[in-house]
Image: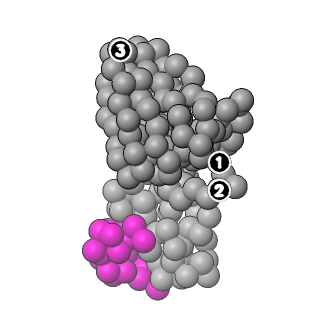
Amino acid sequence: MDIGAKIKLLRTKKSLTLEELASRCELTKGFLSQVERNLTSPSISTLNDILEALGTSLSEFFTEESTENVIFRENDYFVDEREGYKIKWIVPNCQKNKMEPILVELDSGCNTFEVPANDGEEFGYVLEGSVVLINGDDRHIIKKGETFYLTGKNFHFIINERKTTAKILWIATPPMF
């Protein structure tokens, strides 16, 4: 951890000059400048005084913030190949999130697994081909570029009755796949 840079970042976020911070923690401006440039290291007691003047504590200061991954590439995907279809989890470990996007590739003449009735909601976008959505007793044809949105009050699944592979972006909340 770059202690000096982190202190400087906290100081500038508080809109404090070196002189103002030095006055608040009874240190010299020169000493604080050296700390921020990592030319000297403060004692624990002095660091505690600096952090107190910046409105934080030692434990907060040394707690590392976890970096949240927001970009996922094909080599991050988890792929489950089944007979007749392939599911790509395009956001890894998203069962901890509020929604779960998957990419379904459905072979000609095949169907996905049946999703039982549930309390969730689902959205789908047909990227390639044309599919049939079975939602309870209802049957809907969905073509490339069209979408579906449904609640989980009925069982549902998708059939590909065409001769080409269909691709569907399918998003569920809460995660269920």
**Quarter occupied by the C terminus:** top right
Vertical relation: 112 (above or below) 170: above
Amino acid type, callout 1 = Tyr
Q: Secondary structure at mark 3?
A: loop
Q: Secondary structure at mark 1?
A: loop
* Between 60 and 161, the one nearer to me in the picture: 161
Q: Is residue 91 visible?
A: no
**Furthest-front residue in view?**
163
> How far from the left and from the top, in percent, is residue 17?
32, 80
CB atoms of marks 1 and 2 within 8 Å = yes
The tag earlier along the polypeptide, 3 or 2, is 2
The residue indicated by pointer 2 is: 74
Comparing labels 3 and 2, the label whose residue is closer to the camera: 3
The tag earlier along the polypeptide, 1 or 3, is 1
> How far from the left and from the top, in percent, is residue 131?
46, 37
> How far from the left and from the top, in percent, is residue 89?
59, 41
Which of the numbered marks, if any, corresponds to residue 77? 1
Q: Is residue 157 visible?
A: yes
| Span colored in magenta | 9-30
**Quarter occupied by the N terminus:** bottom right
* Between 90 and 103, the one nearer to me in the picture: 103
Circle count: 3
The residue indicated by pointer 3 is: 137
Q: Could you tell me how far apart the alpha carbons at marks 1 and 2 are, in whole angstroms? A: 5 Å
